[in-house]
Amino acid sequence: MTWYALQHKPAQGDRALAHLQNQDIACFYPKITVEKIKAGKRTKKLEPLFPGYLFVNLEQTDPMWAKLRSTRGVIRIVSFANKPASIPDEVIQHIKASLDTVAEQGSIKPGQAVELDEGPFKGISAIFQAYDGEERAIVLISFMQKQQTVKVPLSTLGSRDSRRSD
């Protein structure tokens, strides 16, 4: 059997997955835990690794093909020149094996360069040291020719990598 990608309707990946599984179609909908800072607080959320897509495992002669497009939550089968684009089994197996090792996206790691966006140190580059509770962080800044450890609100931190284009 070969794997194929299906595009699902916005925010209906879980619905499409459930309806496909109810039809006894082998599916794969990889998700990872993502940590984000929202309103100065760290939150963790399970999100799809490939937003908008899930994978099904079918033979080309399987009669279930006719039902795929009419399955609730599914928009279309990813195709090129009206032929469903197949995905080698090795690729899917590699994704499955790698899911556990995928780092949490969005979290700030110790030693990561950040920039302070607000407050008295606005515009100063810093090195993230650690979280200090739910709403604060400890960062290392160079200030007045000295390395200083400072506690700042998480909402003031921005990633230096995403802000610089040089």
Image: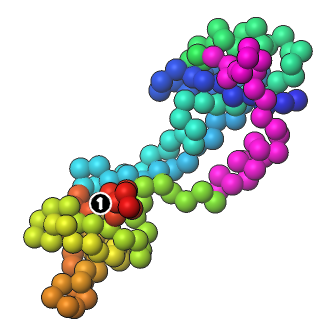
Q: Looking at the picture, does residue 34 appear above or below residue 137?
A: above
Residue 115 spot, x, y in % from top left:
27, 66
**Residue at (21% x, 79% y) in the render:** 150
Q: Looking at the picture, does residue 155 appear above or below residue 62?
A: below
Q: Is 34 displayed left or right of 93 in the figure?
A: left
Locate residue 80: give its quadrant.
top right
The answer to whether any part of residue 135 appears in the image is no
The answer to whether any part of residue 4 appears in the image is yes
Q: How many marks?
A: 1
**Residue at (28% x, 55% y) in the render:** 41
Q: Nearer the viewer, residue 131 or 142?
A: 142
Q: Looking at the picture, does residue 1 appear above or below residue 79?
A: below
Picture colour scheme: rainbow
| Residue 103 magenta-highlighted | no
**Residue at (55% x, 59% y) in the render:** 103
**Residue at (44% x, 46% y) in the render:** 45
Q: Nearer the viewer, residue 153 or 60?
A: 60
Residue 57 spot, x, y in % from top left:
79, 28
Could you tell me which quadrant the C terminus lies in? bottom left
Q: Callout 1: helix, strand or loop?
A: strand
Could you tell me which quadrant the N terminus lies in? top right
Farthest residue to the left: give it. 120
Residue 144 spot, x, y in % from top left:
15, 88
- Residue stretch in magenta: 76-100
Q: Which residue type does callout 1 highlight?
A: Gly
Q: Nearer the viewer, residue 64 or 116?
A: 116
| Residue 87 magenta-highlighted | yes
Q: Which residue is mark 1?
A: 158
